[in-house]
Amino acid sequence: MAVERTLSIVKPDGVQKDLIGEVCRRFEQGGLHIVGIKMLHLTQEQAKGFYVVHKERPFYPDLVNYMTSGPVIVQVLEGEDAIQKNREIMGATNPAEADPGTIRADFAASIEENVVHGSDGSDTATQEISFFFDKDEICARTR
Ligand code: IDP
Ligand code: MG
């Protein structure tokens, strides 16, 4: 294992349900440290760009509308094996298939409105972090 950074998003449904603190608490209890965080209301252009990998999928227009329907929290998480660890804490995309005790099993309304995003690999983590954060917006933990 190595110390990694990954991108997390509390999606518009998670913010609407006042789950920001609960989601961050689960990351912190799981050993993931927040090293960058901000609230944004994504534009259509930002949401389309962020999810461009899914642009041919039938759910893409709905996904873009959902992700622009309200503000989101974007954050950079740091820790041992952070990319995989974040995915474990989130649970499977479809809440019906997510392990008990995961964020999505506990709070997601549907396969679309599933509360959180997390990078799925080291290349995507690097790319997704730089999509939202300048270098000086990420603070190394000095204590
Ligand atoms: P992930 O968020 O678990 O990595 P992806 O397959 O990358 O899942 O899909 C990105 C997002 O698109 C999902 O989190 C969810 O919001 C939405 N999505 C994925 N599959 C479907 C679907 O079959 N119907 C509607 N929305 C979907
Ligand atoms: Mg994904």
Image (cartoon, grey):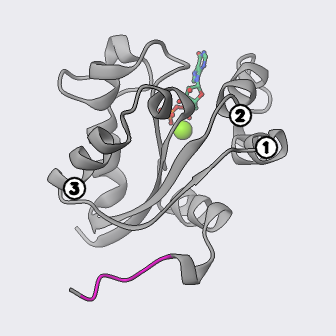
Quadrant position of ligand 2 = top right
Task: Provide the secondary structure element on which disc 1 rests.
Answer: loop
Residue situated in front as seen by the camera: 116 or 122: 116
Quadrant where the N terminus sits is bottom left
The residue at 79%/40% (across/down) is 48
The correct choice, above or below, for 108 with respect to 139 in the image is: above
The residue pinned by badge 1 equals 43
Cα separation between marks 2 and 1: 6 Å
Q: Which residue is drawn at 47% across and 58% down?
A: 75
Figure quadrant of the C terminus: bottom left
Q: Do the residues labelled 2 and 3 touch (CB within 8 Å)?
A: no
Is residue 47 left or right of 28 when viewed as pictured?
A: right
* Circle 2 residue: 68
Give how far across and how far down residue 42 sits, in percent: 71, 44
Label 3 Cα neighbours within 10 Å, binned few <14 / some 14-19 / many ≥20: some
Magenta-span inclusion, residue 70: no
Q: Position of residue 28 (x, y in %)?
A: 21, 55
Q: Nearer the viewer, residue 109 or 20?
A: 20
User: Which one is earlier in the sequence, the residue at label 2 or at label 1?
Assistant: 1
- Give the vertical position of 43 relative to 59 (above or below): below
Q: Which mark is residue 28?
A: 3
Q: Nearer the viewer, residue 24 or 4?
A: 24
